[in-house]
Amino acid sequence: MNLSQLYYFKKLAELQHYAKAAKELYITQPSLSNAISSLEQELGVSLFQKTGRNIHLTKYGSEFLVYVTSGLEQVDKGIAIMKNYAGTSDGGKIDLGCIITVQTGYIPKLLNDYKTRTAGVAFNVREAASAPLLGELKSGHFDVVFCAHGEDDPDIAYIPVLTQQVVVAMGANCPLASKAFITPADLEEQHLISYLDTIPLGRAMRRALDERGVQNVEYNYLDESILAGFAANGVEAAIMLDTFFLHSVEGLEVRPFYLSALERRPCYHRVYLAYSTKNYHPYCVDHFIQYITDNLVLEENPLARYID
């Protein structure tokens, strides 16, 4: 048994197709077939079973895959660390997803700072909403994502990294524009709009407002750009996050949202670095996660209220 056989086995287990696996491994199909047959003979069990033109793992193959994946992960990380010590590492590539409100400011600065400390790492950055980002994180299309906190999932770890303040935005003619700040009591007679309650941020916003008895809210909008547009044109007041979208809309009045006039506790929504605790991570991904953990974890403000 050798490492090549184990890598071949892992790839074939992922694709469940000899021709496709051989192509990705840059070997011939007979070579792959012979390597797997030799591995099965040495182990004394069948790892794969044919199903038409495709194959699938036997119960023995499924169990063996767990050990092979874990073992190869450690080997790959050890090789990467040694190459890094020797100065011969190519740094690796990290597939990173993020919500749009952090891709123009936070992410470029973060990656620039990280690259000055870690030579050679490349980032492939793509923007999407939080729910799709988390779905693609679990499926392995992303290594890490920066997004809102999704539903509790034992396979996803979340690290809080920054906050976005909750505000009320409105047109200049709105009665609320005369106030220095807005509380739930101020909103009793005001029709409001906010985020879709089918997305993580919208669900969190709805929970927070329901707790304070704010019921007259229409949860139908995807992001700050459309919320700010409706609010600036005097259609409704919008309860939303203070992001760069607000600063590009003319005629928009923005006030902080406090839980009470007496306490004046500001509300914030947290953005998290999320990563899978189940999927394989190359060394460069683990190193990036550790960098965030060691240097950029958000410190909780005891005077604030967090809407996650």
Image (cartoon, rainbow, N blue to C red):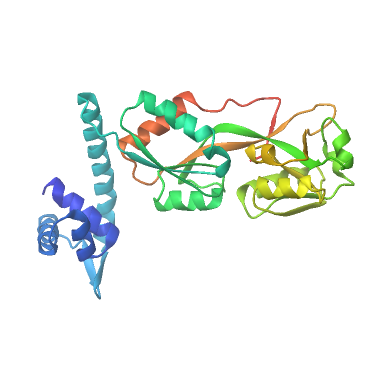
Can the viewer see residue 148 in this picture? no
Tell how many labels: 0
Question: In which quadrant will I find the C terminus?
Answer: top right
Residue 103 in picture, x, y percent from top left: 52, 39
Residue 85 in picture, x, y percent from top left: 23, 24
Q: Is residue 220 left or right of residue 188?
A: left
Q: Which residue sits at x=67%, y=25%? A: 302
The residue lying furthest to the front in this view is 250
Residue 212 in picture, x, y percent from top left: 80, 42
Q: Which residue sits at x=23%, y=63%? A: 20
Query: Depth check: 234 or 40 in front?
Result: 234
Query: Depth check: 263 or 127 in front?
Result: 127
Query: Depth check: 85 or 77 in front?
Result: 85
Q: Which quadrant of the figure has residue 18?
A: bottom left
Q: Which quadrant of the figure has residue 170?
A: top right
Q: Is residue 189 left or right of residue 170?
A: right
The residue lying furthest to the bottom in this view is 52
Q: Is residue 87 above or below residue 138?
A: above
Q: Which residue sits at x=34%, y=27%? A: 118
Q: Is residue 77 left or right of residue 196?
A: left
Can the viewer see residue 251 in this picture? yes
